[in-house]
Image: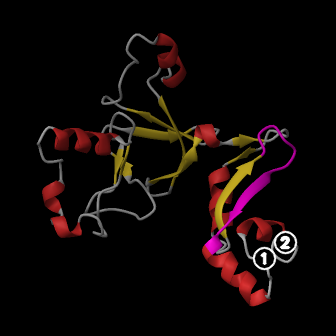
Amino acid sequence: MSGWAAGCASSSREGRPCPGRSRVPARHRRSHPRGVRAHGDLHVTTVNRLERYKFGTVGKALPGTEIRIAADGEILVRGPHIFREYFNDPAATRESIEPDGWFHTGDIGVLDEEGFLRITDRKKDIIVTSGGKNIAPQNLENLLKNDRYVSQAFVYGDRKKFLTALLTLAPEEIVPWAARQGIQDRSVEALAKHPRCCN
């Protein structure tokens, strides 16, 4: 959960309104085109402001926040509001925070030319092939799920020479298709093995 969302949830439980709630009328909070979207683990590091935002991003760095993208694509942040250490866990601190204060978020992303940050994946989800190529499976999985006949997609290939995708069929689409094709056994299990369906 982002710091903004966590703070909001905490404030709501304590009976206090979340910061900025009054800016957008209640009836528009979910669908308001200029709703606030923020990024941060235990802190807020970026925010799309109501007067300056870009769809598909989590906004620009807040004042006093530095953001950079590491060589492997991980988002690193630094600033006075970033926590200094994990409580009683120096090993986790060393793993997550560099000596010069850069915090490894675990998110993969890109900064555009205007400074807007877009999160593309989680670092732990990155596949590294046997050839050393880093691949974000989420992008491929989303492309596969764009097919109307696919309900779920899982891409695998860590330390392998090639990627493999496991797909599940969308019954609400594949069964009517099979009926139009004159296929007698229209169970999803049978269609998954049918040569006209999955060839």
- Rendered-image quadrant of the C terminus: bottom right
Q: Position of residue 23 (x, y in %)?
A: 15, 60
Residue to which mark 1 is pinned: 185
Magenta range is 157-171
Which sits in the foreground, 157 or 149? 149
Residue drawn at x 30%, y 69% as measured from the top left: 31
Label 2: which secondary element: loop
Label 1: which secondary element: loop
Which sits in the foreground, 93 or 49? 93
Q: Position of residue 59 (x, y in %)?
A: 38, 54
Residue drawn at x 85%, y 77% as measured from the top left: 196
Q: Which mark is residue 194?
A: 2
In this rendering, would 170 be left or right of 100? right
Q: What whole-number distance in Å separates the C-alpha atoms at marks 2 and 1?
A: 9 Å
Give the residue type that dot 2 points to: His
Which sits in the foreground, 73 or 147? 147
**Mark before the other along the chain sequence, 2 or 1:** 1
Residue 164 among magenta residues: yes
32 up-or-down from 153: above or below: below
Residue 49 among magenta residues: no
